[in-house]
Every structure is written in structure tokens, then in C-alpha cells.
Image (cartoon, rainbow, N blue to C red):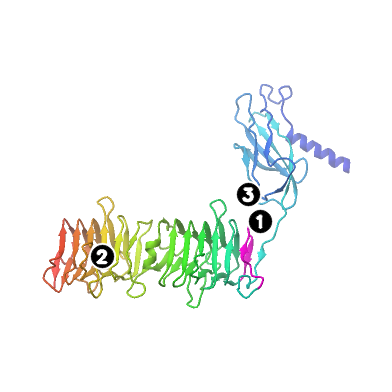
Amino acid sequence: MKTLKSTLLALLVISVFSCSKDDDSPNPGNQAPSSFNLITVPDGTTDVDLKPTFTWEPAIDPDGDAVSYDVYLDTENPPTTAVASGLSDITYMPQDNLNPDDTYYWAVMAKDGNQGETLSNVASFTTKEEIAPIVLDCNSFQSNNNDAILLLENRIDGVDYIIDCVIPVEIDLTIEPGVVIEFADAAGMNVKESGSVSAIGSQSAPITFTALTKTKGAWKGIISSSESVKNQFDYVTIDYAGGGTLGGNNESGSLIFRPGIYFRLNNVSITNGATNGLKATWYDYNVEINNCTITGCDTPIYAEANVASHISGGDFTGNTIDAIRLIGDAGSRKIGNSQTWKNLSVPYRIAESLSIEDGAKFTIEPGVVVEFEDGKGITLDKTFNDGSALVAEGTPENPIVFTGVTKAPGAWHSISIRRTSSVQNKIDNVLIEYAGGAGAGGAIEMWVDPVLSVTNTTFKDVDACALYNRYGPANPNLTEGNNTLENVSGGYMCSE
């Protein structure tokens, strides 16, 4: 039996790997491709990744024929299992992981399409030992734990740690580049006031927070109440979060910020979230959001209006609602500091009317789209003259747009400019459409003769006047000109 098995194997190897020669080829006029060597994985290599990349030298065909390659990979020597056929490239990566801690043999056959074949050398290698992820105890980051973990290391290729609870972070936690953390269903992370998280990855070794179950909302996400300057995510991915709620106020989002926190987000990717990608609807934030991508969520960002000025750019498309949704009513969430809204990939959506007060200069860049939910608007200098200003200066090629979520006349209220004496109030090269909702006298309302310039502006589909002056027949402090009306029910200029 042993002799028969050896004979059959030899016959199989000969039939698979025989190299055609000029004198015995079924096609005598054809020359086989030249000999070539394997490059990676080299013969005798140990501790090889479970999904290695195989490369080899090109085989040159003397007749100029196109050469293709078949890859053989097996745990027996010689390898007889063809894992890829007809490759034109000199590289191959298996779709699935190889077995850990096992010895493999591989070889490549070069073919010229005319029955000419040349076999490479055979190389062997041993894959690395598989190391299981560590399941972290729920008290791993608690301050009263003498064995609290301060550093999560990049232990292995693949998942390093598993968290199966809403784990509190009460210490300063550092996460190394390349770390992958999987969260069980309904698990999450709660960064307390006394704690912080510094997760600084790199482009080649990002840090990943993901789910055991790869579905939207499989885990709850991360919530932070920490004001520590150590809080930073750089080259971090948060995936499949936003399911359920976190914190005492039952908030939902892949990443949630509580009032007054400090956080820096650079090159962060939030994907496949069940609700908000980032939720920060409280006040007094010290945050920066730079070059981030949020996609596959319900809403990319739902935040207090002042957060918008700290978004430097990024990609916020591919969500159910492609807009930065904002609340900026009077009080703690008013716009009370000078700031600029940059032209992002999506509109700013006003969910609660904006209030601009306390001498703030509110600048909107050319090309910005501000869309209002039904009945919402902007009020500047709400109760008295404090010198606040709205600077909305577009260009003919890149106008600023104030529009409604609902595309109908009167869907949103108005831009209400009250009392201000700031000469910086300018609206130029702007499109204002679908304004003039219930109670509005005009798309732009002027209270108590504010200083204001409105030029090169189009008023379209307005269910009121274009310009409306309260408390007087005319506003002596208004500069206007070269404005256009399209379907404006109340006319150009109105007053009480």
C-alpha cells in the first residue's frame, strides 16, 4: 500500500509540474518560459502572517508569448493544491487566513499558453502561532483597581481585546497604534470625569473600535465626560456603534460628548453607526474635528451650534441625512463668540433657531449651504444692541445659500437683524429661498434700524416680503442694491 501511494503521488506530481522542453513538448516549435525564483515568502521563513503576500520573479518567454501563473500551496511537500490559476501578476494573497502554527509548501508554475510550462523552486514556511484576544474585565480601567490597565498594547495582527460591558474609564488610558478592540453586543465605553483616552494611531496602523457582530448599532459607542487635555483620537476608526443609549440622559451616538469636555479628533473615521456619528448637543465644548470621515450613519454630526466652527473639513456624505445638524438657541448654546463656518461637503442644518449675541461676529464662507428645518431661523442681537454681526459674503461663482429642508415657500422663518450698529453686517452674493414662514414679515427682517448691507442677493419662493422693516417706515441704516426677486409674494420692501 505504501509503495502504491508513493507511486501515485509521483505520477501526480509529474503530471502537474512537468516542464516542457523543445525536444519532448507536445508543441515542438514552442519554447517554455525561462526559469524563475520565488521571492516572498522565502524558503525556511518562520512566524509568517496568516494572510501572507506571495511574490516571485517574472518568467520570460523566449517566443514572446504572454505568461500566466498558477500558484500551488499545500501542507504537503510537494504542494499539489492549485490555489490560483491564470494570474497575470507576479503576486498573490489568499482570501482566507492560513492555519496558525503550521508548515506550508508553495510553488509557482509559469505557462505560455502554448503548452510550455516552467516550475519554480519549492519553498516552505511556518505560520505564526495564533494568539487569542484578551477579554477585559469591566473594572480594568477603574481608579480603585490596583491592577488597572493604563496601556493597551498592539499584541497581534487582528483583534487584540474584547469588551463585553459598558466599561468605565476612570484612569488615563493610552492605546497603541494598530490596536483593535471588539465590543460585544450592547457593550460600550464610558470615559468618566477623572479619566481620559489617548488613542493616537497612524495612517499605516490605525486604532479600531468595532463590533463582534458586524451590523449597525451592534454596540453602544463611546461617551466622554472628561475635560482632560489628554483626550485625543488620531487615525481612529469607530465602526458599527450607536445602538442603544449611554449615560444618565440616555444619549445615542457612536461618539458622544457631554458638557464642557476637551477632545481632539484628527483623521477619525466613524462608519456604520445606527444613529448619530458624533453627538455633542450640550455646551462649553473645547473640541477640534479635523479631516474626519463620518459615513453610513443616520446623521454624521448632531451638535450645539458653536461646535460647527471647530470642524476644519472632512467627508460627511453617505448617511441617511447628509447634513451637520445644529441647535443654537439663546442661552448656553447661543453663538456668543466670533466664529466662522467653513464650506464643508454637506449643509449645516438648523434644528433650533440660531441666536447670535454678545458682540459675536458670525462669518459664513462662500459656498456654504445653511438649511433650516420648518419654522426655524436666525436672530441677531436679540434684545439690545451689543454689536453682533452677520457676515455672509459669497461670490458670483460660489454664493452662500439659505434654504429650507422643506422646499416650499414659507418653510422656514427669516433672518432677523435687530438693533445692531455693527458696520460688518453684510449679505452679498447670497440666495435666500423658501423663507417667510408664519409670523415673518420678510425673508430678512430689520428691527429698530440695524446697520445692514444687502447686495447682489436673490430672494426666491418667499411667502412674505424680501426685506421688512419693523418699528418704522424705512431703515435709514440699510444699504441695498442689485437684488433679484423670484416668486416673492410680498414684494421687495415692506414695513409696519
Instruction: Specify the label residue 475 is tagged with.
Output: none
Q: Amino acid at mark 1?
A: Ile
Viewer-proximal residue among 378 and 317: 378
Figure quadrant of the C terminus: bottom left
- CA gap, disc 3 and disc 2: 59 Å
Q: Which badge, 3 or 1, is on the more N-terminal residue?
A: 3
Q: Which badge, 3 or 2, is on the more N-terminal residue?
A: 3
Q: Amino acid at mark 2?
A: Ala
At a point 23% along the width and 60% down the height, the residue shown is 427
Viewer-proximal residue among 391 and 353: 391
Figure quadrant of the N terminus: top right
Expressed as whole percent of the image width and height from the top left, the position of residue 450 reads 18, 68
Q: Which badge, 2 or 1, is on the more N-terminal residue?
A: 1
Q: Amino acid at mark 3?
A: Gln
Viewer-proximal residue among 22 and 226: 226
* Magenta stretch contains residue 161: yes
- Horizontal side of 395 relative to 235 (left or right) equals left
Q: Is residue 236 shown to the viewer in this render?
A: yes
Instruction: Specify the label residue 95 is tagged with.
Output: 3
Dividing the picture into quadrants, the one containing residue 425 is bottom left
At a point 71% along the width and 43% down the height, the residue shown is 73
Q: Nearer the viewer, mark 3 or mark 2?
A: 2
Expressed as whole percent of the image width and height from the top left, the position of residue 284 reads 41, 71
Highlighted magenta segment, given as a residue range = 146-164
